Amino acid sequence: MLPAQRLAACLLAAALVALAARGGAEADRFRREYPVQALAITDTSAEIGIEYNYFGETIRRSGGGRTRYSNNYLQEYYQARIRGYAYHPRFLTYSAQVKLGLSQQWLKRESPGDSTSSQDNDELVGYDLRVDLFKEHPVSGTVFARRDERILMGLFVDRYLVRTESQGATVRWRNGVAPMDLSFTRSRIDEYGADSSSTTLSDTLEYNLHHSIGKRSQTDVQYRYQSFDRDFQANTFNGDVERESELNTHTLQATNRLNLDVAGRANLRSTVRYHRQRNNQDLMTYYWQERLQLEHTENLRSYILASFLRNDYSDHRQTDTYRGEIGVDHQLFDSLKSHLDVHGRRTVTQATEEDRYGVTGRLNYRKNTALGVLSAGYSRTFDRVTRTGGDAHDDILDEAITIFIAVPAFLSRSDVVDSSIVVTDPTNTIIYNEGFDYELTHQGRRTGLRVVPGGLIADGDLVLVDYRVEIDGDIAYIADDQDVYVRHDFDRYLRGLSLYAQQHDLRARSVDAFDDNFGLVEYTDRMAGLRQEWRDFAFVSEYQDYEDDLGGFTQWRNRIEGNHRINSRIRWGWHAGINQTRYDSEREIGDDDESEYRFAGAHINGTFTRHGYWKVEARTMQETGRTERTTNGIIARVGFDWRRVTVEGGARFEEYDVFDSQRDRVQVFVRMKRTLGRRPEGYLR
């Protein structure tokens, strides 16, 4: 080594030791555990494994004909892991996981008059790489790259293989004035299912900045860019679906909180946001809001709010919304909470102008009684609505609803244009498909959504919905919206029993419309129920009566469930229920129909010896009436760890029967792996 190189190495080593030194015992501990080295390895491990996955599906139609599809997938791999640092952990740490192997795939499809098969042998490459620079320095960074392949197995989910590839980097600056970070991620996700497949490409850039001036002012700035491209193909009972989704978004938001006093009891929060998206419908949004929050006493608070929202659409439409609100919140002891506000909103489009102003009052009461806890609430809103102009439509963006298999979740507005409905996940990136992931139901002039079993939406998932509604111009009325509920939870004598009831009414009063068919839905939604818990059992029964000006329905929902512990190793649970719905579709002519939804399920899981586990789950669902559908499924898993050997396996069987078609799915999964390698002595924490 040349003298100049030796001198540079010595200076670098000295600088790193100085950087690591914290003085006293801490510095000595760091020197012993992390000596300065050009490349230090702190942890290593490896494993070899083999995985096998079989997926088969048989489709039968009442008109004759049967189609069979099978996919056999086998992979053998070697995986190595390593962690360590360069010179010192405060300078650079790294971790790497590399997976190398071979994969074999056999595909076969048989249909009347046609039979095809193919075989594919390919190399298997996976990795998870990460490097952290200057972790404890004000300026730090992270670089990562991942490539992974996962086999999925779950009931009523149309995915069994997911391949993910992503790369990215993050830079952080933790200065005392304005700490910030910048990150970029690029990813590709390939998903394969029995009746669907998709390829998703995504680029994401995020920037965050925070600035504080003592305790008086805090400012946050966020910028996010995302480019999303997804190709989706599916085979449904109603035919083939092909959809390409493209989404490009730019979002810039700045939020500032200004404390007007030292204690922060009076503060002003300002928010400014710019959002631009390009997809099936281009949109540009400008938003500004000011909110003054005042805490007069410990139990009395008030606020003043003002906001402006502008939406610019690709078809040269523009919507401006001005909003103002003044409110007060009060709490009396621990029992009574009250709220009162006066609000107003003005919406201006190219075709219409709407003024909505009114008052809202709300009471919430909670009291400990001799038998338990009583809670009740009442709220009422009076809004004077005046709309001028011709007939037009209004766009609703990102309405959040929770959708289920058996019970339709209705959108908040009536007269929805079905073709305008777009359903996405809560992150607004994955666009779901009608007929495969969800289905539409109609009741009078209201539109509801339900989960389709076997799609990509699980029962009880939260989704976002964009849609368009038809609105009538030249109308004035008073919207009367009231909600009342009462609930009692018993903790003495009838311990575990809860009784509750709720009623929601929406009425249009003093209507002055150009046309009698003025496009407003008036409805009453009543619900009463009980829940009884006893030891390991629970029973729920609810009755709902919904009625609007064009139709309604009554529904009786019952569910019983239990969770039991047989011994220290085995637990099992079960549930069963029935939902009965009677629809009054056309009240004028009395055209009624009924639907019934029965469901049941059970699961049992346990352990054996000290290293083994097993689990079995079965579910069945049957719908009759408006939809004729039967869904059955069972899944079993077992796994065992012995020293360095892990063996896992599982199987599932599903049956779908919809109208004149039947699908049977079978999946078998087996994995065996053995851990290799050793951990080096020293340098281990």
Image (spheres, rainbow, N blue to C red):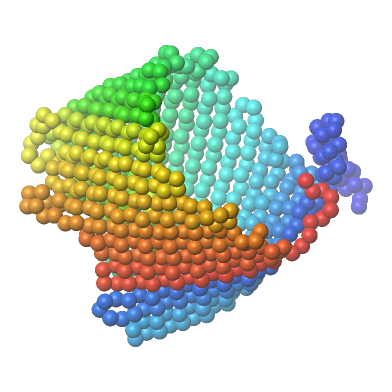
Q: Who is closer to the viewer here, 27 or 495?
A: 495
Residue 595, above or below 374 = below
Residue shown at the point (53%, 64%) measured from the top left: 637
Residue 506 shows in the view: yes
The residue drawn where x is 16% and y is 42% is 548
Q: Residue at x 56, y 67 (%)?
A: 649
Q: Position of residue 132 (x, y in %)?
A: 69, 46
- 471 vs 195, nearest the viewer: 195
| Front in this rendered view, residue 145 or 547 | 547
Left or right: where 22 falls relative to 193: right
Q: Is residue 233 visible?
A: no
Indicate whether 79 appears above or below 110: above
Q: Which residue: 45% across, 72% down? A: 666
User: Compared with residue 620, is residue 552 higher up or lower down, i.e. above or below?
Assistant: above
Counting from the top left corner in percent of width and height, residue 80 is at 71, 62
Residues 434 and 361: in front is: 361
Q: Residue furthest front?
A: 493
How many numbered marks, from 0 up? Answer: 0
Image quadrant where residue 626 sits: bottom left
Q: Residue furthest bottom?
A: 113
| Left or right of 407 on screen, residue 79 | right
Q: Position of residue 569 (x, y in %)?
A: 58, 56
Check the image and name the residue furthest to the right. 3
The x and y percentages for residue 474 are 12, 34
